[in-house]
Amino acid sequence: MKSIPAVLLVDTGVDDAFAIALAARSPQIDLLGLVASFGNSKLENTLQNTLWLTQLLGVQTPVCKGSAHAFCEPDWVPEEGVVNCHGDRGLGPVVAPNTLAAAPASEDAVAFLAGILERSEEPVALIPVGPLTDVARFVVARPDLIPKIRVISLMGGAGRGGNVTPFVEANISSDPEAAATVFGCGAPIVMCGLDCTRDCVVTAAMVEQLRAESEGELAQVLCDSGAFYLSIDELLHDPLAVACLIDEGVLRTEEHYVDICLTPGEHRGQTVVDWEDRLGRPANVQVGVAADPQRFWQLVSAAVKGTL
């Protein structure tokens, strides 16, 4: 199988860290770049985490500094010390070094993405696993390059039940206007939302077994941060958006029309799925409805161990 050229857009983040390892180490993915934005923590933290992980992986993949706030306004920018499943700095108890040899290859996400797509001889997969801010900025600034997007395989959304409110998932909640822009851009979209990531259960016992079977600093970092994160939420969301490109059998999808709610209140950011095609509108999203947890964990654990 020919590798898929791809760019991974992250807000690194514990589950983002696993997604980065999977994308960087899979022979089915040709990882052309990484874009780090705000989301699970402040941009300065997510960017530092991303640069550090590329060093631990020993890859030369260029990292771009992405957006520090939402598409239309600084709607929600996390503060230092916010208690969540990613901890204060994004990787739970693990803290990236304050000084790194690496530096961002670019601080202009639109130009960075445009350059990658223009240089690629074939369409490129965009894999956003955080807020959709930088993808939205790109498709607005460079609509001429939308045909060169192979697919937008995103982690975000929820057709049936959110995790920020009863209706809204966290990544979409962070920037609903960006999500609405991306979902309406016309590029092929696969939505790995909570409807399917809730199948990706990873327990503390699974992490400890992975730790026992792994060697090296990267594995230690992932297992330490993973143990913290999974003690709060036993679901490893972000790597599914990568895994479904590597192995089509990991994810089952249904084609539906999806809209983003932008009205104020508890529904703001909801990915409204027309499950029964009542609106009669053309489908714009392949909605993930179920995942194969065994195939998923086999890929993720192999990436951590370096045996993919």
Image: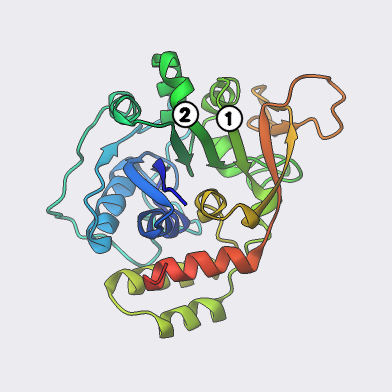
Q: In x, y percent, where is residue 140? A: 45, 16
* Tag 2 near tag 1, CB within 8 Å: yes
Q: Is 158 left or right of 213, judged from the image as shown?
A: right
Q: In x, y percent, where is residue 173? A: 57, 36
Question: What secondary structure is marked by label 2?
Answer: strand
Question: What secondary structure is marked by label 1?
Answer: loop
According to the picture, the residue beneath numbered tag 1 turns out to be: 188
Q: Is residue 78 above or below residue 89?
A: above
Q: Amino acid at mark 1?
A: Pro
Q: Would you call the spot at circle 1 few (<14 residues within 10 Å), some (14-19), or many (20 or more)?
A: some
- Residue 33 versus residue 237: which sits nearer the camera? 33
Q: Is 70 left or right of 177, judged from the image as shown?
A: left
Q: Is residue 88 above or below residue 232?
A: above
From where the camera sits, is residue 234 visible? no
Q: Amino acid at mark 2?
A: Ile
Quadrant containing the C terminus is bottom left
- Asked which colour scheme the image uses, the reply is rainbow
According to the picture, the residue beneath numbered tag 2 turns out to be: 149
Q: In x, y percent, where is residue 259? A: 69, 25
Q: Is residue 109 above or below residue 282?
A: below
- Residue 165 versus residue 133: which sits nearer the camera? 133
Could you tell me how many numbered marks the image carries?
Answer: 2
The residue at the point 45 percent across, 70 percent down is: 302
From where the camera sits, is residue 206 visible? yes
